[in-house]
Image (cartoon, rainbow, N blue to C red):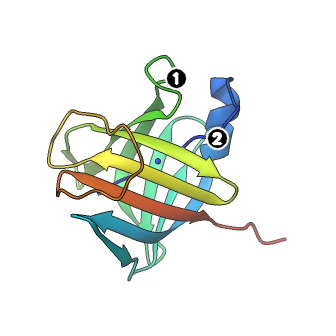
Amino acid sequence: MALALGAPGLKDPAAKANLLIGEWTLESTAVSGRVQRAIEDMRDEFTADGKWLRYRSGKKVMSDGQYTLHPKIDERAIDLKVRIDNRDFPEIQAIFKVEGDTLTICLAQDGRTVRPTDFEIPKDNQTGLFVFKRVKKKD
């Protein structure tokens, strides 16, 4: 359902957030130990003011999504709030990293409140791993 980011050596939360800001195309997912290539055109966007937007085939499919970074908990910690069709979903606890133009988000699923501790491909259906590529801006 969701995803997130981090880069080695960045201690300033504002600098880390700047790595996350932008538009990302979903490349693959891993759930229950199986990696799957993204089939549909899904893009996520993170804005400087904490908004998290999701698009499929160019249409907005998530309203009022938000993200919050928690550098005091873990420099990789991010919480995602989802609202779809005026319905709020439980907050998603996740970790993220940004390496070059790749964003990886590992998140708790199924309403769990335990934040993942690593980016291993999950062997259970309680954790999801999402890999995104940064959308390049057209000149």
Placement of the N terminus among the 4 image quadrants: bottom left
- The spot of residue 128 in percent (x, y) is 30, 56
- Report helix, strand or loop for mark 2: loop
Placement of the C terminus among the 4 image quadrants: bottom right
Q: Is residue 56 above or below residue 50?
A: below
Residue at 40%, 77% in the rendered image: 38
- The spot of residue 13 in percent (x, y) is 63, 25
**49 and 12: which one is in front?**
12
Q: Is residue 73 left or right of residue 11?
A: left
Q: Is residue 53 above or below residue 25?
A: above
Which is more N-terminal, label 1 or label 2?
Answer: 2
Q: Which mark is nearer the camera, 2 or 1?
A: 2
Q: Residues within 10 Å of mark 2 (few under 14, many from 20)?
A: some
Q: Is residue 80 above or below residue 100?
A: above
Q: Is residue 124 left or right of residue 27?
A: left
- Report helix, strand or loop for mark 1: loop
| Residue holding disc 1 | 71
- The spot of residue 3 in percent (x, y) is 40, 52
The kind of residue tagged 1 is: Pro
The kind of residue tagged 2 is: Ala
Q: Are marks 2 and 1 in contact (CB under 8 Å)?
A: no
Q: Separation of disc 2 and disc 1 at Cα?
A: 12 Å
**96 and 51: which one is in front?**
96
Residue sitting farthest toward the bottom:
39
| Residue holding disc 2 | 7
Residue at 20%, 44% in the rendered image: 89
